Image: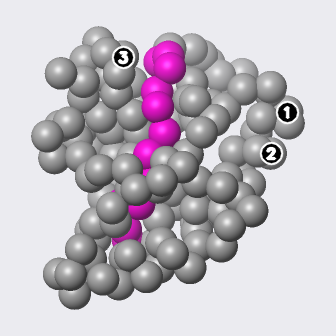
Amino acid sequence: MALNIKKLCVGAESVSDLYYRQDHIRSRHNETIHITRMFPKRFDEILKGGSIYWVIKGRLCVRQEILKINRFLDTEGTKRCRIDLNKNLFLTVPFKERPFQGWRYLEEKNSPADTKNFDINETDDDQEIISELHSLGLV
């Protein structure tokens, strides 16, 4: 069974914002990557099909498949963790999340289901409606 990670997307206002941030990184590096300070101790479990679930504006609402996780030293000699991600974003059933630092492990059985593939040409209105219905206990 794969293990997932949930992580705050600090400063992002929407899934579109996450997409554009990652598109900017892709334009510079030709890959979708996320750099973080800490390396996950349970990385072997994550690499068995795990994903990163992004929390945006207090809601866990989008998922991305993790392809690789590597340690490296930055230009100042500080240990870092590079997470290579599939560029495709999948919208999920939104869940409210309290703020936290770093990341948290997310067991597959507790992970929200995907609702659809994210398309930058569509508005985020559907996700807002689903999120509101979920908060009312109707979805």
Amino acid type indicated by mark 3: Leu
Report how many numbered discs are placed on residues in the image: 3
Image quarter in which the N terminus is found:
top left
The label number, if any, that marks residue 47 in the structure image: 3
The boundaries of the magenta stretch are 58-69
Q: CA distance from mark 3 to mark 2?
A: 25 Å
In this view of the protein, can residue 51 be seen by the observer?
A: yes
Mark 3 Cα within 10 Å, few/some/many (few <14, many 20+)? some
Residue topped by disc 1: 28
Residue at position x 76%, y 45% from top?
Answer: 23
Residue 33 or residue 120, whichever sits in front:
120
Q: Is residue 28 left or right of residue 128?
A: right
Q: Residue at x 17, y 37 (%)?
A: 107
Q: Amino acid at mark 1?
A: Arg
- Residue at point 35%, 84% (across, down): 132
Q: Main secondary structure of the magenta part?
A: strand
Q: Position of residue 37 (x, y in %)?
A: 47, 33
* Whether label 1 touches label 3, CB < 8 Å: no
Mark toward the start of the polypeptide (3 vs 2): 2
Q: On screen, 122 above or below 30?
A: below
Q: Is 21 above or below relative to 134?
A: above
Residue 97 horizontal side relative to residue 17, left or right: left
